[in-house]
Amino acid sequence: MGAGLGPLYAHPHAPDRRDRAPQALSGALSGQWKPNSDFQTDVDLLVTRLDVDYDEFGLDIYPDDATFATPQFVAGSQKVVGDTVVAGTINNVRWMASRETSLNRHDLTIFGIKQAWTPGAWAFNAEYGYSRARSYHPDGKATTRDRIAFFAPLSFDFSRGSTSIPQLTTTVDYTNPANFVGQAFDYTWKDSRDSDETFRLDGSRVFSGWFTKIAFGAEQHNMNRTYLRRDWVLNDILNTPLTTLGASFYETMPYTGFLKDFAGNTPRTWVTPTSDAYYNKMFTSAVAAQPWSAADLRNSFIVDQKIHSAYVRGDFKFDLGGVPVSGNLGVRYAETKQLASGTLTSGSTPVPVGYLKEYKNWLPSLNVKLDLRDDLVGRLSASRVVNRPNVTDSAPRISVSRDSPTASGGNPDLDPFLADQYDASLEWYPAPTTAVTAAVFIKTMDNYITAQNTTIQVPGRGDVLLSASVNGGDAEVRGFEAAYNQSLSFLPGPFDGLGVQASVTLVDSKANYFAGNRQIKDDLVGLSKQSYNLVGYYEKGPVSARLGWFWRSRYLQSIGSTTTAQSYIAPYGSLDGSLSYQITPQYAVTLEGSNLTDEVRFTYGKTKDQPMEIYHWGRTVSLTLRGKF
């Protein structure tokens, strides 16, 4: 983010979200047949349904959007820190109050059958697994977004830093419905279906001598994702005074206490649209019957992926200079065929497209264990692994932003990136209930997946900046980790159930890749330089308790694009705990809590002078009763 409006390019958004408690149902069935010691059949079935219902309120401010009016920066009002404008005044800015509601249902079915046969020194396993998932909107109602707006000056001040809310003021009263006019009503329907089918056959034989075992196997993995999406943008109420629409179209925000823990002059309550009046007025049967638009077709896709793989591995065990050595050496071959289908447009004409992608990989691995002493173990490992692209990133799709000239898309020509991994560790067991471990690791990544920006023409929208994933970056991660685990069983009862766990991880990364035309060096998404955990636990009889502090340093959340800066999550820690009691052998009750100290998470841009987001979701406590029959 360079000189100019700085952090305001992120569209300041003051949301309040009321998530209703998710409704979950699940059932599991397992069976086993073992007529003799050499033959065993296992069958498992799991069915779950999760309903997630949310109601979200927002006040969006668009200081760089000229769709309905042309904002004008007031010369001389700016305050600049480094290369960022952190304060100033802009006239003719759109302030938009919105409300989004959605009921999302997630269904999952998993079936598996496993056949084991162990004739003598041989062992064979055959497995079949099938899973099916669907995410959709039940009861015929999808995601609604109601929008109302006014146009007024914006005075902004972000100079208090990334841990304080910005000052956002205007001369217009945003609690008065007479100041608002209608904007668009958005209605979005989505149906995502995934299936995953696996056939696997493994065999092994044990031997005497230094070569102790050979293992081999083959697998076929068939995956499919079908994603369908439709968006209706209905402008029937555009520029209609809110009071003309009537009192059923608005209300005072039905929530109090927003931003109560933060000082500063910024909106905390405003006129909000109601949740049903817009839908009932505009989403008629005639609208619902409209044919799929070119944008709907561009948003939808199907990706079929078939992976055939086979492996062979040999286990060994021998003495080397009086040190017992054991381990295995193997190689896996994987062949991937992917067909990504969707719709692109030639001018305004939808054109069905399909892209076939194939790649083959040899993936060797080596694992070695050295029993240096009775209480000291060393381990070495090396492997080559493949990281396949996310299905959404490799689908031929284009999704254009509703409120800015940007879009995201998939790249069906995307290759996986390969990584070489090396690990070395020492494990010390000074007592039967104590373990101290330390490890160093290196991971090098070739053809790392990064982002690229391209300007495209979208009918009705003009020039749009399209962001899509491409190959081309290189990265390396080096690190050290240490862990300590001790059960305090030597204490007198009832304290002999106490224990402690602690770990620390230190990481250094070297990277060189691009987000659009911006170069990013030595930062990888989701990777903290330091992290540590400290956990105390108690396990004795029917009682099991755990309390832990989990902390990580700053990390890259998003690489951004040519026109937007990368974003970082500030250092963050969370105190989580659980308490479980086994009432009977069949029933147990568990009390779980997360973020017990009510921590707040902060996001900023290239520097802390570019504050972006503040997340305060509070404490979460759940009580669960589990039973088995």
Image: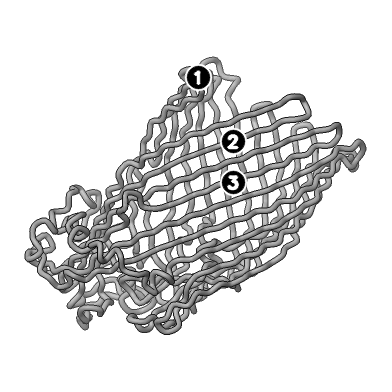
Q: Position of residue 603 (x, y in %)?
A: 38, 59
* For residue 256, above or below residue 242: above
For mark 3, what is the residue?
A: 130
Q: Position of residue 277 (x, y in %)?
A: 17, 57
Q: Residues within 10 Å of mark 2 (few under 14, many from 20)?
A: some
User: For the residues carrying marks 2 and 1, which lies nearer the camera in this image?
Assistant: 2
Q: For the residues marked 2 and 1, what is the alpha-carbon distance in whole angstroms?
A: 27 Å
First reached walking from the N terminus: tag 1 or tag 3: 3
Q: Of the residues shown, which amino acid type is indicated by label 2? A: Asp
For mark 2, what is the residue?
A: 44
First reached walking from the N terminus: tag 2 or tag 3: 2
First reached walking from the N terminus: tag 2 or tag 1: 2
Residue at left 52%, top 45%? 532
For mark 1, what is the residue?
A: 542
Quadrant of the rendering where the N terminus is positioned: bottom left
The local secondary structure at tag 3 comes to strand
Q: Nearer the viewer, residue 624 or 132?
A: 132
* For residue 318, above or below residue 59: above
Residue at left 87%, top 39%? 212
- Camera sees residue 443: no
Q: Residues within 10 Å of mark 3 (few under 14, many from 20)?
A: some
The local secondary structure at tag 2 comes to strand
Q: Of the residues shown, which amino acid type is indicated by label 1? A: Pro
Q: Nearer the viewer, residue 285 or 454?
A: 285
Residue at left 38%, top 83%? 463
